[in-house]
Amino acid sequence: MADTDGLLDARDFGTSAGPAASGFHVKGAHGQDWGLRNRLSRIFRPDTGRTVMLAFDHGYFVGPMAGLERLDTRIAPLVPDADAIMMTRGALRTSIPATTDAGIVLRASGGPSILRELSDEHIALDMEDALRLNAAAVAIQVFVGGEHESRSVANLAALVDAGQRHGVAVLGVTAVGKDMVRDARYFRLATRISAEMGAHIVKTYYVEEGFETVTASCPVPIIVAGGKKLPEIDALTMAYRSIQEGAAGVDMGRNIFQSDSPAGMLAAVRAVVHDGLKPEEAYEIYKEKAAGAA
């Protein structure tokens, strides 16, 4: 058992300073090999250093949820407007045109369905297949505080080793169980562990208090998960605050493909992330596109 009696709470996160200049647009990647930096540039736009990732990997544990009944007709038309797309290899091979320019992020962990303990995951993708599919990155759940925490961290480490050998980035996804506290202190712990184990990108949730300390204390880019479906203006507000508080982008799924106008919502999110529009301004883009599609 670790001796935690002498640990002091972190205090100085330097949130006003921003990341140190490195000459490369992706935080923490200036020392990586050319191939890995090139793949990161497929995910993060070089002109902004940010990304809008469209996530539709949910079917690997929940099946055909609302909005994902038909990947070929509901999701494929949205792909050209996303910087990167996150899905399983099965979804990519069957439903996404090979002409896409989006950065490919493949779900690399799996095992249990929503009917079982979700932290009981294993690596479910070989890096050779990721290369065969021209992936820019692979994604894996990390269950800090979960029943199978140690295995999930070991899974991440093994995937990072394979990624470093082949120049493929690894996205560590902060998995939060329903009984876990969602606050800045927990997310500082979970995101930092993923980064320290070698993840090149970390995906986590936004919290209203102290989120800037989460982004500041993580040495690699943080992208924010959309989470459950919110009213469009609320989702745009979350995206705006995330970027203002140090996130390098968003990875949204339900808040796009379950919207009344998925294309309109994706355009609005892009305006927030890349153009700096405020939520109310971006919401007008959403409404205009929704009205035009009606």
Image: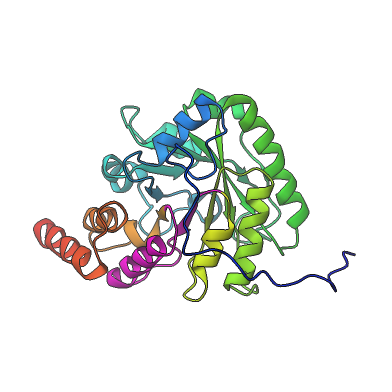
Rendered residue at 27%/39% (across/down): 80
Does the stretch in magenta take in 233? yes
Q: Which residues are magenta?
A: 220-248
Q: Is residue 103 left or right of residue 277?
A: right
Rendered residue at 46%/42% (across/down): 26
* Picture layout, residue 113 above or below residue 94: below
Nearest to the observer: residue 153 or residue 9: 9
Q: Residue furthest left?
A: 292
Q: Name the quarter where the N terminus is drawn.
A: bottom right
* Picture layout, residue 35 above or below residue 211: above
Q: Position of residue 77 (x, y in %)?
A: 26, 43
Does the stretch in magenta take in 235? yes
Q: Position of residue 161 (x, y in %)?
A: 69, 33
Q: Is residue 218 left or right of residue 255?
A: right
The answer to whether any part of residue 153 appears in the image is yes
Rendered residue at 56%/53% (across/down): 61
Nearest to the observer: residue 243 or residue 117: 243
- Name the image colouring: rainbow
Q: Position of residue 19 (x, y in %)?
A: 49, 52
Nearest to the observer: residue 44 or residue 148: 44
